[in-house]
Amino acid sequence: MADGGEMDEEAMMRAFFPTSFGKAPTRPSAASHSSTLRKPQNPSSNPSTSAAAEEDDVGGAVVGPPGPPKELAPIQEDDEEGGGLIGPPRPPQRPSAHAEVEDEDGSMVGPPRPPPSKEGDEDDEDDDDEDDDDDDMDDDGDDFGRIPLSNEIVLRGHTKVVSALAVDPTGSRVLSGSYDYTIRMYDFQGMNSKLQSFRQLEPCEGHQVRSLSWSPTSDRFLCVTGSAQAKIYDRDGLSLGEFVKGDMYIRDLKNTKGHISGLTGGEWNPKSKETILTSSEDGSLRLWDVSDFSSQKQVIKPKLKRPMRIPVTSCAWDHEGKRIVAGVGDGSIQLWTIKTGWGSRPDIHVEKAHTEDITGVKFSTDGQILLSRSMDSTLKIWDLRKMKTPLKVFDDLPNNYAETNASFSSDEQLIFTGTSVEKDGQKEDF
């Protein structure tokens, strides 16, 4: 009983003190993370660090003043007691495409530079600078790398000069027009080894084909011949109708319902499947609605110094279908922006852009560059923001055909056009 009384008395005494009374004070321990700290590879090589970071054999707590912060590294280490691996596993080493980089102290960091190829390049930097040039050069040293010359076929059938070509937006069908008054239709998907056209058309007897243009939906195409009436065909070559011819006895061209002289060019609006543009020898351009063959939507008369009829020799839409450009027989280039209430006054007028008839005009995709081809044996590049002088003039390009055009490559880094040469005493167009 005495012992029990003493124990009750001792318990009552402890009730007056906090539970931590009589226990050793606790302090934050670094032992919980010491296993992930990277140990020096050779402790003797850095005595200051090893002396400041000695561990107790029992609890693993740090003894002595804290040393400098240690570098964390996900490297597996052997435990001193059990020999097991502690810490996270070493990450797998992956090859890197980055070359060695020189640090501030001059040491090389990063993965080593890959070994040179067997063929060997004496100067990598020079090779990098010349890669683009090498890709664009063929075995003969010509700049034809970006032109698809690996395969070709010859489509035969016309008996005279091919004056018009048109590929539908899907790339499956090709139209060709010629001075033999016919159109041939080729279908790549249904073509056999004979490479023959599946249909031949004669739009207007006795009139050469001057221009062909597909609709943006590839379901119809426009045919322009030397007659005064343009025609519309469906995808299979069936005629859908022809536009009306104007009254040649009416002096004011704006009062006629259509062209009164032979057409020189035409093009489908690239953004509207119902609108087309035509140019004529009667000195006008006209916008048509393909749903109404009886009358045009708009008549455009170029700006002239004197009231007279000068033929409009070429025309084209920009890629947004908001502007049209025309080459006029007086050598001028005139451009109109289609907007509400617009008239025949051009927004851009370049007098004497060429000394002879302009046979073709073409917008770039961004609408800032314009090409013009002429029978004065030149091809000119124009910046539409500064039209006073051309950016570049290519001369000595003979041109004997009124349908000779110019265009851009798909990346618009190259320009191509046709030229006329004399061979065996006869003029041929290439």
Image (tube, rainbow, N blue to C red):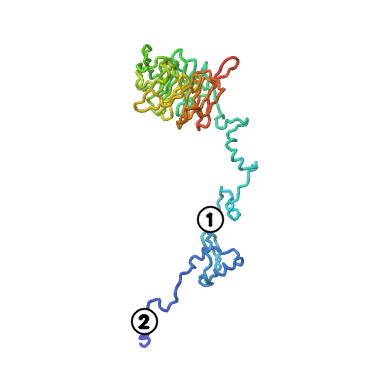
- The C terminus: image quadrant: top right
The CA span between labels 2 and 1 is: 57 Å
What x and y, as percent, mark residue 159?
52, 16
Amino acid type, residue under disc 2 in the picture: Ala
**Under tag 2, what secondary structure?**
helix
Nearest to N terminus: mark 2 or mark 1: 2
Residue 76 visible within the image: yes
What x and y, as percent, mark residue 220?
41, 24
Res 398 → quadrant: top right
Residue bearing mark 1: 91
The answer to whether 218 appears left or right of 424 in the picture is left
Report the number of numbered marks. Answer: 2
The answer to whether 209 appears left or right of 295 in the picture is right
Circle 2 residues within 10 Å: few <14, some 14–19, many ≥20: few
Given residues 68 and 217, the one toward you in this image is 68
Q: Residue at x 36, y 82 (%)?
A: 13
- The N terminus: image quadrant: bottom left
Q: Is residue 299 above or below residue 145?
A: above
Q: Residue at x 51, y 60 (%)?
A: 88
Residue bearing mark 2: 11
Amino acid type, residue under disc 1 in the picture: Pro
What x and y, as percent, mark residue 17?
37, 79
Q: Residue at x 59, y 63 (%)?
A: 41
Given residues 355 and 62, the one toward you in this image is 355
What x and y, as percent, mark residue 6?
37, 86
Q: Residue placed farthest to the top in the image? A: 249
Residue 364 visible within the image: no
